[in-house]
Image (tube, rainbow, N blue to C red):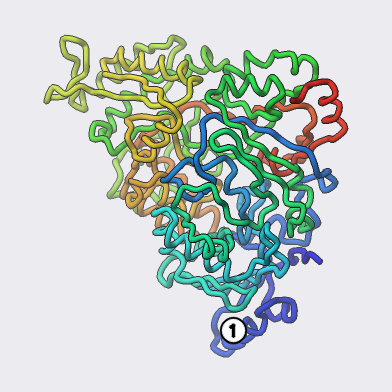
Amino acid sequence: MIQRPFARVFPLMATLGLLSGAALAQEAQNVADSEGADKIITSTWYSDWDEAKYAEPFDHLDYVNPEAPKGGEIILGTVGTFDSLNPFSTLSGTPASLSSSMYERLMSGTADEYKSASYCVLCETIEYPESKDWVIFHLRDDVTFSDGTPMTAEDVVYTHNKFIAEGTPSWRSGVSAMIEKVEALDDHTVKFTFQPDIPRSGLIGQAGATLVMKKAWFEDTGHRLDEKRYETSPGTGPYMLTSYDPGQWVEYTRNPDYWGADHPFNVGRNNLDTIRVTYFGDTIAAFEAFKAGDITFRQEFSSLVWATSYDFPALENGWVKKETLHNGSIPGASGFLFNLRREKLQDRNVRLALGLMYNFTWTNETLQYGLFTQRESFWQTPELMATGLPEGKELAVLEEVKDDLPEAIFTEDALLPHSSGERSLDRRNMRQATALLAEAGYTPGDDGKMRNADGELLSVELLHYSPSWDRIIKPYVENLIALGVDARYNRIDPNQYQARRQSFDFDMIFDGYSNGFEEGSGFLQKYGCDEVDDIFNPAGYCSPAIDKIGKELLNADTYDDMAAMVKAADRIMRYDYFIVPAHMNDSYWVAYYDMYEHPDEDTMPPLDLGYLDFWWVNADREAELRAAGALK
């Protein structure tokens, strides 16, 4: 029988007899009571803000169809290749798409909560003291790996320790600074003890995000996490790797014996029998395969293709459905990103000058069919983005780091993207850019090229891998050349691009940062000075003020306090201008063979498209399409 989440947080004594390890917990509570120490809190969910949408018992998540049928397949297309099925070795090899989907975490979140909460999946309940010095997970006793063997607390401990020993350097250092030790109290009880002298915000959530792999498999095979390989360990997740052709395609199949199929968290989810990802040499080949019925679902990212190319027979015949769905997520803080590790790009005036030559208005209207808007903020949502002059709690945060900031942060409105005219080359912006370069020590020579006092050219290479970006990047490069910059566009193959990005061998790329509706322990991994050589900080950004704010984020008592710190950080980072803001889209563009169904728009969650999660296949419609020859 699946136990549903409890209605509220309550003392552990109420759960006696329900949990493995309950005697140990009761003893701890008795000691706490006798010493006047923290009360022990027991729950099936956790949130730093003490809020959870699904705190009360529930049968299924609000945004799923609990009657969704199981069955069918989905075939996706992607560009590139892969030479590994180990998703945890990002510095060695290129992992296949979805290769981490076989593994589950102790707790998981939902797609309809902006203030995130974590809910027990592999655990029945968690318990922790009010001090949040530790957390105990009472694991379910019915969880099995895909090979049918049971999951135990030893698997949790082993997985954590293996990531500490062999995970990416940034993950190892970040998690080691938070978690002191992990220990199995019995077969189904595992305790995470946190480091004594760090803020408690985010620690229980970090522990709950621990994924679990099979200890015996690694011990039997001797495999490591930091190696390129095709062998995969069994996972507890709903899907299993079933077949692949190296570099060509990979296929995952729903586990018919998945332990969690009837868990309220999973009802109406994981509906597809088969998920297949096929690799192509370029985006044109991938699109042609979709038009021919070799690919069955496509999420479109090219405004050109979306606006001009969806007029093929399968669409006209009604076999393919084209749909725009709302995306309520915070858009990625992406744009033309500067590598601040390059000395020539460390001058803010140089970056501002180069940014002024990107004409969003002309690009969007002429090349992107007016389908986008321009991003302003690193956190493009009213609750978290800086506006106007700083005030209130945000101003108080900035005052605390005033010695590390220019006066303009306090006296000028939050920096907005520059405006441009309707012609590709905006002469007004070019004059302003020329003045900024002069302040940075660059002046044009007889040949019109910008040089510094030592006669060195201002050279900039823009790097990308996709032909579809040629039309966006080339006009920008032409504008830079007109300014006198020795600029060039270099399109390389995806594997070379990944290697150069990972080794920070670039001047400018189109890239960015992924931010959320709340920030905490991961903030400094992205923006901290200690992480300038981390792949999660592609620009190599470093600011003493941001470092101080990032550390205080962990002490935020309320969401409003956290939001004030994020607004302050947003204001500072926009001023520092290490990304030229580009386009954003608050919609998902999808096209698919008309056999897939999803909840209606009023039910769809704001934070996930969910086509591999809570969509399903209409078997009758699939049969009709096959009979008509629409599908290969």
Residue at image x 70%, y 68%?
A: 140
**Res. 449 image quadrant:** top left
491 and 328: which is toward the camera: 491
**Res. 43 image quadrant:** bottom right
Instruction: Count every numbered label the image shows and give the total.
Output: 1
Residue 602 visible in the shown view? no
Residue at image x 85%, y 24%?
A: 627
**Disc 1 packing (10 Å; few <14; some 14–19; many ≥20):** some
**Quadrant containing the N terminus in the rendered view:** bottom right
Residue lying furthest bottom: 34
Report the amino acid beneath label 1: Ala
Q: Is residue 82 left or right of residue 439?
A: right
Under circle 1, the secondary element is helix
530 and 183: which is toward the camera: 183
**Res. 494 image quadrant:** top left
Residue 433 visible in the shown view? yes
Query: Is 491 situated above or below 165?
Result: above
Residue lying furthest left: 454
Residue of label 1: 28
Residue at image x 71%, y 70%?
A: 141
Q: Is residue 589 left or right of residue 330?
A: right
The image position of residue 250, as x and y in percent, is: 61, 39
Residue at image x 26%, y 35%?
A: 342
Q: Is residue 130 left or right of residue 623?
A: left
Query: Is 437 situated above or below 403?
Result: above
The image position of residue 89, as x and y in percent, is: 46, 49
